[in-house]
Amino acid sequence: MEAQTATTPSDAATGSKTLADLLPLAVEKHAAKVAQKFKDQSTGEWVDVSYPELGQIAKEVSLGLQELGIDRGDKVGILSNTRPEWTYADFGILATGGTVVPIYQTNSPEECHYVLEHSESVAVILEDQSQLDKIRKVRDQLPSLRHVISMEPLDGDDVMSMEELRERGRGRSDDDFKQRVATVEGSDVATYIYTSGTTGPPKGCVIDHQNWRDMLDMVQSQNVLMEDEVAYLFLPLAHAFARLIQLGSLDVGATIVYWERDPQKIIPNLMEVKPTYFPSVPRMFEKIYSLANSNAPDKAQLEQAVQLGLKVRQMQDRGEAVPAELQEAFDKADAALFQNVRNIFGGRIKQAVTGAAPIAQEILEFFYACGVLVLEGWGMTETSTAATCNTAEEFRFGSVGKPFPGVEVKIAEDGEILARGPNIFRGYYKNPEATAETIVDRWLHTGDIGRIDEDGFLYITGRKKDIIITAGGKNITPANLENGLKQNQYISQAVVHGDRRPFLTALITLDPEEIVPWAQAQGIEDTDMASLAQNEKVQALVQEAVDKVNEKVARVEEVKKFTILPHDLTQETGELTPTLKVKRNVVNEKYAGELDAMYRK
């Protein structure tokens, strides 16, 4: 598929040349707008930060870093949850000409050490005491690390607060800031993003300012993020997806609403701030979908309502007149169901975006019927976040959309998706071998398997490394089966296994928020997760979900046996990436005994 011709970015955009001058230009262009919104934990009130206020804070951070001796090209880590200070640190480092090295807040001390040591970071800006404790455990193994800065005031001679850093910056002139920003060029490295990776140690993706700028222009040309949007952000800013939303929002004058750093408060936050734009990973949509289905008194009526919603909205999108009888039935379904689903998102959502992992088409169709347009895009850190997307004007459920203007996508002989364009990263830091394997003749070998339909929409059918080849020689993509199982409200994770085995098996984890109330309603007294995993009624409940999925596939693709694990998979135990993708090799190794047992029975 050849590249589309790039179009002019939004008139609302800053026209920045790099990420260093993006925020100063945004301050001038969007001076009257709200840049950030966050909840003050002491008062419980939402606080607005204007573009000029954000610009001033980032400038003080940048000048403070200059005062510490941070020079162009120096690497500075950010170890924090998604919060306003992450953005202050990000733009402060970029304006200094430094390279931002994001670190997931869930990383262990050893993982933090790996990233900081490998990147030769000279400073790290961290969130709080828990993150400082991690750095203190490995500080003596980081000879390059000269400065530790904390977003929150902490005790110790080995750490300075961000407020102290800003105070140091106030002693320098605006000219120092402007001159440093002016020295930054598009070819300068903006960030090393260490891929969380489902296999092996993380690799540092080198992304320069021009990569990001081109990516932003592509996003804006497709109206993915528009001015005056209110974007709710809970995804980790250490991940490229959230970072793109941050950069894109501020470029066009949108408002970023930061979560309260509590998963239980995401939906209450959405209902309070009523965002218009909601980027997420599939798990959030899966949970809301399960919630809506579990509350439906009649599953058949729910399915009828969804099909009705799909039909009417497709007619509306095509500009067709909706017959009065159909409209009347639609209005009743809207009042009874659709409106309630929209209200979960705050009632003002124009568009939601999902990425980083597969999502079932049925879930996308459900939300569309309810009036919440959830669009899939596709890309990876190596594409500076994205390469294709569906848009409100042109989308096809089940696909990940068409390539952005300027991006070319093609399918190799073995089915692998290849991509090239100005957003392709420069390579892996200190790893020329991996770079040479990944970029061949300017084509990025993505590792994903897919197909392109006659209209140019790309479909992801699997991951090259995840393809299961059974003992009988059958190639099977586990993601389809796993997505089907996860649609069940009581199942949190499903990992299908069967490579070089005679049949497929699955490791299943239960969703504590759903299974415990169900068990209590069934009169089950012991609701400990380990006990529930062994309970006959729970086993039968999961068997029903497995049978339902098996009905839709050929016999060779059926899951013959399953084991319910006594706990959910987590990032902390190394089984999930920060974007909640399963680390298949870790799970297979960790639960080898359980897997082997299913083949001995």
Image (tube, rainbow, N blue to C red):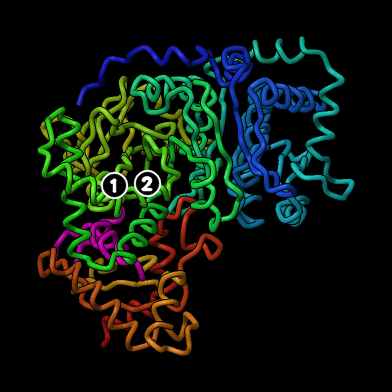
Q: Residues within 10 Å of mark 2 (few under 14, many from 20)?
A: some
Which residue is at a point 20% across and 76% down the rendered structure image? 560
User: Does any portion of residue 431 appear in the rendered image?
Assistant: no
Residue 370 — which label? 1
Above or below 250: residue 345: below
Q: Residues within 10 Å of mark 1 (few under 14, many from 20)?
A: many
Label tally: 2
Which residue is at a point 30% across and 62% down the rendered structure image? 293
| x and y, in percent, of residue 65 in the image | 76, 27
Q: Which one is in front, 527 or 164?
A: 527
* Mark toward the start of the polypeptide (1 vs 2): 2
Above or below 224: residue 338: below
* Spatial separation of the CA atoms under disc 1 and disc 2: 7 Å
Q: Are marks 1 and 2 in contact (CB under 8 Å)?
A: yes
Above or below 315: residue 131: below
Residue 416 — which label? none
Which residue is at a point 24% across and 41% down the rendered structure image? 416
Q: Is residue 467 inside the magenta stretch?
A: yes
Figure quadrant of the N terminus = top left
Residue found at the far right of this picture? 157
| x and y, in percent, of residue 402 in the image | 25, 30
| x and y, in percent, of residue 283 in the image | 40, 55
Above or below 426: residue 544: below
| x and y, in percent, of residue 528 in the image | 50, 83
Q: In screen coordinates, is 308 left or right of 513?
A: left
**Amino acid type assigned to the residue bearing label 2 in the image:** Arg
Please tell me in which quadrant of the rendered image residue 485 appears: bottom left
Q: Secondary structure at mark 2?
A: helix
Q: Which residues are magenta?
A: 463-490
Report the residue marked by disc 2.
Answer: 342
**Amino acid type assigned to the residue bearing label 1 in the image:** Cys
Q: Which one is in front, 26 or 442?
A: 26
